[in-house]
């Protein structure tokens, strides 16, 4: 107890070492994925603003499914980590089964969007854009091909997230590295027709992704067959605990809905930004986020570390320890967020190097957006840590209050800005993101109520 008093705001070196050992491999994995995305963006940017814009609007729609997939796996992961802390093998398997059943239930919708209604949905992203039809032609072609990576992505993400939730992060990192190398190499070969291959441009980028995702899935499946982790047991699908399934779904539904509202508001706001100009606005905004992903990796690392550390303590019934760990992680988040601001500023130097093929207007938009994003990093990292703590204890109502309700406010607020002002997309973005300070206040209030201090595995 004396040690806890001395370290009220910051944990011991051993505590942070254990968190870092979980978080850093996850961040490295995210970094590699971001680098692949950046290289994709760099190579596609060489094809011009219109093709870059087409790939970008497709990616924005596909990102919605990625967010939903993440929300589903996080819902199951809340219980996965606590059952892991309680050393409950059957509970872990039930959590894994939940991820599989719900994730594959969403595949049909993914196929409808990518194969059947792709152009109609993509058109929503370029309303008012002066080059909409040309952008849509490129986006539709890319979107259709992305339909062929749905199943591979779901399987890989379910397995990778489950390993992260029990603190085993090294092998998923290695598999991601291998898939990233394949993706990058095939991009170079297929987009521009190197090594005697045909020049496929946007189709080449899509084919590279399909092949890399398929290889990644195969490697994950082979590894789980060899490793035989406690969370996988095929017999569980014949004996699903529907009471537990319903409990996870009840808590998870709030998380899924809040994430759906958040990503919907992000998509609507992006569509409004895209309508303020031509392909230069779309490609410039897209380019900024491709680079920003290099420091957005901090979200995945701190989210995973926080969830595993606190979820494990809660699952083991060490509630007071979890309370202390909450404070220690939030203190670290403040310092880490400030550091990431300077990292963000440094990435502006990449713009003329990576995107020299884009117009000067696009490059200017990209640079301005990176500065805005960098300034907001401390707030975002702190919010992510707050929400990771509440989710670790199954208090998903906080996510609904923070992401869901605020997202509902964002759209009418932005529509008013768009209608009554002539602000640039960057200025509008900054004004909208000022609402995130309200998110911090709401989450902090809910943390103090301590509804997240719950041992779910004991129920």
Image (tube, grey):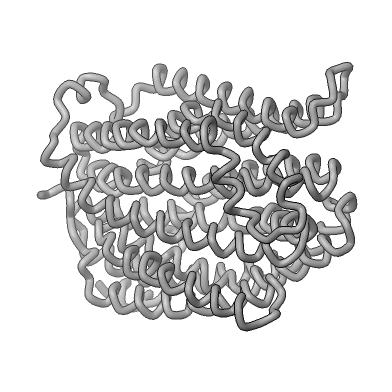
Identity of the residue drawn at 30% across and 26% down? 232
In the picture, measured across the screen, residue 180 lies left or right of residue 361, that is left
Identity of the residue drawn at 87% across and 19% down? 195
Quarter of the image where one finds residue 384: bottom left
Residue 122 drawn above or below residue 270: above
In the picture, measured across the screen, residue 261 lies left or right of residue 215, that is left
In the picture, measured across the screen, residue 75 lies left or right of residue 284, that is left
Quarter of the image where one finds residue 181: top right
Task: Report the front residue among 150 and 445.
Answer: 150
Q: Position of residue 98 (x, y in %)?
A: 27, 36
Identity of the residue drawn at 51% across and 24% down? 217
Quadrant that contains the N terminus: bottom left
Task: Report the front residue among 3 and 148.
Answer: 148
Q: How many numbered markers are drawn?
A: 0
Q: Visible in this render: residue 110? A: yes
In the picture, measured across the screen, residue 394 lies left or right of residue 420, that is left
Identity of the residue drawn at 82% across and 67% down? 364
Q: Position of residue 96 (x, y in %)?
A: 29, 34
Residue 169 drawn above or below residue 208: below
Quarter of the image where one finds residue 210: top right
Q: Position of residue 106 (x, y in %)?
A: 38, 36
Q: Visible in this render: residue 433? A: no
Q: Position of residue 120 (x, y in %)?
A: 56, 43
Task: Report the front residue among 314 and 412.
Answer: 412
Residue 452 drawn above or below residue 68: below
Q: Residue furthest bottom?
A: 420
Residue 423 drawn above or below residue 42: below
């Amino acid at each position: 107890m004396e040690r806890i008093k001395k370290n009220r705001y910051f944990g011991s070196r051993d505590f942070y070492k254990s968190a870092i050992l979980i978080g850093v491999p996850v961040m490295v994995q995210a970094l590699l994925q971001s680098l692949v995305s950046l290289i994709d963006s760099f190579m596609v940017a060489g094809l011009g603003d219109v093709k870059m814009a087409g790939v970008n609007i497709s990616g924005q729609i596909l990102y919605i499914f990625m967010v939903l997939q993440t929300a589903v796996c996080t819902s199951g992961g809340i219980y996965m980590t606590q059952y892991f802390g309680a050393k409950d093998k059957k509970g872990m398997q039930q959590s894994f089964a939940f991820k599989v059943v719900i994730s594959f239930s969403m595949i049909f919708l993914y196929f409808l969007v990518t194969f059947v209604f792709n152009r109609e949905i993509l058109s929503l992203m370029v309303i008012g854009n002066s080059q909409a039809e040309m952008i849509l032609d490129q986006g539709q072609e890319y979107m259709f091909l992305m339909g062929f990576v749905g199943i591979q992505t779901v399987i890989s993400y379910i397995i990778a997230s489950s390993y992260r939730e029990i603190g085993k992060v090294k092998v998923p990192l290695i598999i991601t590295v291998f898939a990233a190398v394949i993706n990058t190499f095939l991009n170079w070969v297929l987009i521009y027709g190197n090594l005697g291959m045909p020049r496929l441009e946007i189709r080449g980028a899509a084919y590279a992704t399909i092949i890399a995702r398929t290889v990644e899935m195969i490697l994950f499946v082979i590894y789980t067959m060899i490793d035989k982790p406690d969370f996988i047991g095929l017999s569980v699908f014949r004996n699903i605990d529907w009471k537990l399934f319903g409990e996870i779904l009840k808590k998870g539904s709030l998380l899924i809905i809040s994430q759906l509202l958040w990503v919907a508001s992000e998509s609507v706001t992006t569509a409004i930004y895209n309508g303020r100009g031509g392909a230069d606005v779309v490609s410039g905004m897209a380019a900024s986020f491709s680079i920003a992903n290099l420091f957005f990796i901090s979200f995945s690392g701190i989210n995973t570390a926080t969830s595993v550390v606190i979820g494990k303590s809660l699952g083991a019934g060490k509630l007071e320890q979890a309370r202390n760990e909450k404070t220690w992680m939030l203190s670290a988040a403040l310092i880490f967020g400030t550091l990431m601001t300077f990292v963000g500023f440094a990435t502006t130097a990449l713009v003329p190097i990576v995107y020299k093929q884009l117009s000067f207007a696009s490059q200017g938009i990209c640079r301005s957006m990176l500065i805005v994003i960098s300034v907001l990093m401390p707030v975002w990292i702190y919010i992510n840590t707050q929400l990771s703590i509440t989710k670790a204890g199954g208090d998903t109502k906080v996510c609904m209050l923070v992401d869901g309700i605020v997202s509902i406010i964002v759209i009418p607020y932005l529509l008013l800005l768009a209608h009554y002002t002539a602000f640039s997309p960057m200025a509008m973005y900054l004004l909208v993101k000022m609402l995130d300070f309200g998110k911090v206040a709401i989450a902090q209030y809910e943390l103090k109520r301590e509804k997240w201090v719950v041992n779910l595995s004991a129920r």
